[in-house]
Amino acid sequence: MNIKSSDFVLEIGSGHNPKPRSDVLCDKLPEDDTERGGKILIDRPFVAADGQYLPFSDKSFDYVICCSVLEHAEDVSLFISEIMRVGKAGYIEVPSEIGEKLYGWDYHKWIFKLSDSGKLIIKKKTKNSQFGQLFHYLYKNDKDYAKFHTKHHEIFLVQFEWLEKINYEIIESDDDLIDLNDINEIKRLLAKRSHSGISNLLRRVMPSSIRDFAKRSIVKSYGRNRKTLKDIKHIIVCPICKNQVQWQDDLILCPACDREYPIRKGIPFLLK
């Protein structure tokens, strides 16, 4: 991710494993861990919000991170338009068609592919994995399979960085986005992994405890100058009408559309 040291960074769908560089965290379901891999982590300014209705003013962030979230969206086009509205640049990461077929998540609604021209291709997901929980179980319980997954990590993901505008297309098709019977397509797919070979190698050889320690150190380092929730109040808007809001002790009011949003345990719930 091409994030400058001075960039103000939002992470949408931060969940249980937010990126160290994110300044503000946003998640739709902070009290429900059903669709993530663990208990939510809130260690910096946090807002409960839906990516389709973001409660932030236009272009209030230099960079927006959105990992393993877009595939959950009801309206993927609305979600993408909101990302572009609040951010100037960003990074999107979603399961690839291979990852979705092999692992399968019942609550995922979209399939993605990155075209050779750099366009994000999206289509509606119509069926779940035929393998059920098999490869989830192998990843957790079989070290050899886990090594295989880590070595080929990128083929299970679509990684897309954008500047100013997200180039995407939603298509209607019953065909697969990737033709795995085409050996040339397989070669092109594997060739795209080369750019992240070093990070893949580190992921394989570095113990998770060391990686976690390094991540905590980065978070702590950025945390010295991290903004608080009080600092970002001026960029918070009504998620529906996008007008300025008024803050009270346990409530946020939108005078423009007469809506109220609760503040619970210090967390503003700006949900539609």
Image (cartoon, grey):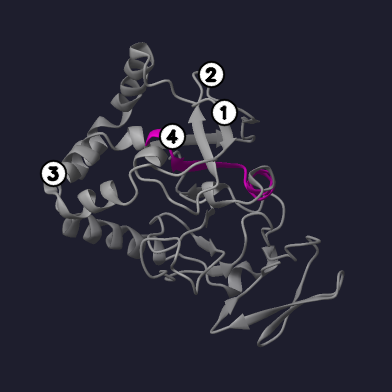
**Which quadrant: the C terminus?**
bottom right
Secondary structure at numbered mark 4: helix
Secondary structure at numbered mark 3: helix
Numbered badge on residue 117: 2
Classify residue 216 by image quadrant. Answer: bottom left
Q: Which residue, given by chain and number where applicable, does mark 1 sit on?
A: 174
Q: Marks 3 and 2, Cα distance to the nearest angstrom?
A: 33 Å
Q: First in sequence: mark 4 or mark 3?
A: 4
Q: Would you say the residues marked 3 and 2 are in contact, meaning their CB atoms lie under 8 Å apart?
A: no
Q: Position of residue 34 (x, y in %)?
A: 44, 66
Horizontal side, residue 188 vs residue 231: left or right: left
Relative to 165, say whether 42 is above or below.
below
Q: First in sequence: mark 3 or mark 1?
A: 1
Q: Would you say the residues marked 3 and 1 are in contact, meaning their CB atoms lie under 8 Å apart?
A: no
Q: Marks 1 and 2, Cα distance to the nearest angstrom?
A: 22 Å
Q: Marks 2 and 4, Cα distance to the nearest angstrom?
A: 18 Å
89 falls in the magenta region:
yes
